């Protein structure tokens, strides 16, 4: 069954904030299925490692989609939105 809500989270070099952004999505108490999709735009800091840790430990909810090259914010958003499978989409940036 597809999730009702897709939390669409884009990141780029946000190692100081990304864990808190992911935690804020995972803390939500929902009576429905949701997913957290992290689209990293070829970060050169620890952002991908941090995101992967959450994806590995919360694989039921969290999926990471790294980019091999930097796409820029608009193309990364487009890519992220295409990956969402929920009926509703919540937008979140890695430093929110």
Image: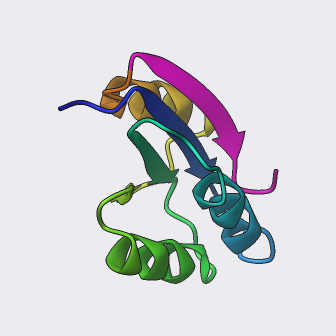
Q: Is residue 89 magenta?
A: yes
**Residue 13 in picture, x, y percent from top left:** 69, 67
Compared across the picture, whether 54 is left or right of 21 comes to left
Q: Is residue 80 magenta?
A: no
Magenta-drawn segment: 87-96
Residue extending farthest front: 31
Residue occupying the point 66% across, 66% down: 23
Compared across the picture, whether 8 is left or right of 55 comes to right
Residue extending farthest top: 87
Q: How is the image coloured?
A: rainbow
In the image shown, does 67 or 19 lie closer to the viewer? Answer: 19
Q: Is residue 74 visible?
A: no
In the image shown, does 84 or 15 lie closer to the viewer? Answer: 84
Residue occupying the point 50% across, 30% down: 75
Residue occupying the point 60% across, 74% down: 47
Q: Quadrant of residue 83?
A: top left
Compared across the picture, whether 9 is left or right of 69 comes to right
In the image shown, does 68 or 95 lie closer to the viewer? Answer: 95
**Residue 52 in picture, x, y percent from top left:** 42, 76
In the image shown, does 40 or 19 lie closer to the viewer? Answer: 19
Residue extending farthest left: 1
Q: How many numbered marks, from 0 up? A: 0
Q: Main secondary structure of the magenta part?
A: strand
Q: Is residue 50 visible?
A: yes
- Give the quarter of the figure containing the N terminus: top left
Looking at the image, residue 15 lies above or below residue 63: below
**Residue 22 in picture, x, y percent from top left:** 63, 62
Looking at the image, residue 56 lies above or below residue 89: below
**Residue 41 in picture, x, y percent from top left:** 52, 53
């Amino acid at each position: 069954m597809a999730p009702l809500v897709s939390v669409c989270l884009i990141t780029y070099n946000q190692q100081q904030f990304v864990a808190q952004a992911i935690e804020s999505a995972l803390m939500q108490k929902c009576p429905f299925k949701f997913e957290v999709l992290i689209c990293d735009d070829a970060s050169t800091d620890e952002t991908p490692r941090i995101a992967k840790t959450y994806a590995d430990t919360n694989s039921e909810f969290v999926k990471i989609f790294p980019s091999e090259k930097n796409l820029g914010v608009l193309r990364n958003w487009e890519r992220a939105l295409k990956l969402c499978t929920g009926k509703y989409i919540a937008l979140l940036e890695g430093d929110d």
